[in-house]
Image (tube, rainbow, N blue to C red):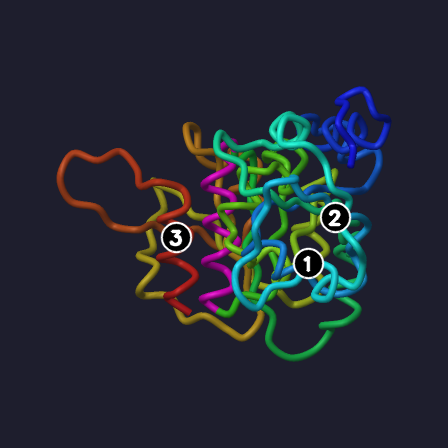
Amino acid sequence: MITSTSNERIKYVTSVVKNTKARRKEGVFVVEGEKMVQEIPSGILLECFVSEDFTPSAGFDPAGSLGQEPVVVSAGVFKKMSDTTTPQGILCLCRQDRLTLSDLLSQRDKGGLKLLILEGIQDPGNLGTMIRTAEGAGFDAVIADENTVDVYNPKTIRSTMGSLFRVPVITVPDLYGAVSDLKRSSVTVYAAALDAMADFREEEYGMRLAFLIGNEGNGLSAGMIDAADRTVKIPMKGKLESLNAAVAAAILMYSV
């Protein structure tokens, strides 16, 4: 049992949990909690840690289910590693999915393709909710710019409720270039904009489409709106200026 937070393995995992730069540099992330751990697909698990006081639910055997014996750590060490106020006693180090937009378009060069594109989303809960909703609405992938909060942020991961393992999330350095690539691949790009003339309910959507959703406070940049094929709005009554970004994304995704 590991009892010191100075242990190199513990320091490494803790840095991955707490630091976005460490996650991106190492290409790894941490999944915490029994339910989320059970969602981990084969092939990406690197190492599992359990607290000395962890008691698995009936029918769940970490070693048998994950294919490797977990590393046992003291309760104090686990609390230091955990991102939650009340740790659930189990967390796993996993390898990030490195799917690129080129990979996706090569795999889906024909037929239907539904995408959600995000510019500057800052709230981990919003991002996680969008990924979760994308799965529910049958969308194929989420594309985000580098100004969007890290998809492997622990709060984002928890908000996805496991959808992160089933819906590819591709972070791109050049969102304008990504939109151009999509348009060349016969994907019609719709920007959600408050001043759009078209009601989203009146559009005739094709089989290959993408919705652009912008930052919670500022919406989409003018340049990104211009890059889209069409702009659409969600009509609102009352004195609201806008809807929550995740809510707007959900309405648009379920509309198709």
Q: Which residues, given as a range, are shown in magenta?
A: 122-137
| Residue 189 at least partly seen | no
Is label 1 in a helix, a strand or a loop? helix
The image's mark for residue 62 is: 1
Of all residues shown, which one is farthest toward the left?
A: 238
The residue that mark 2 highlights is 48
> Which amino acid type is shown beneath numbered disc 1?
Pro
Residue placed most toward the observer, 122 or 90: 90
Locate the N terminus by quadrant.
top right
Which of label 1 and label 3 is nearer to you? Answer: 1
Count of labels in the image: 3
Residue density around tag 1, few if under 14, some if 14–19, many if 20 or more, within 10 Å? some
Q: Residue at x 74, y 48 (%)?
A: 48
The residue that mark 3 highlights is 232
Residue placed most toward the observer, 65 or 44: 65
Question: Horizontal and vertical percent for residue 174?
Answer: 72, 39
Res 10 quadrant in image = top right
Res 209 quadrant in image = bottom right
Question: Horizontal and vertical percent for residue 67?
Answer: 79, 63
What type of secondary structure mainly makes up the magenta span? helix
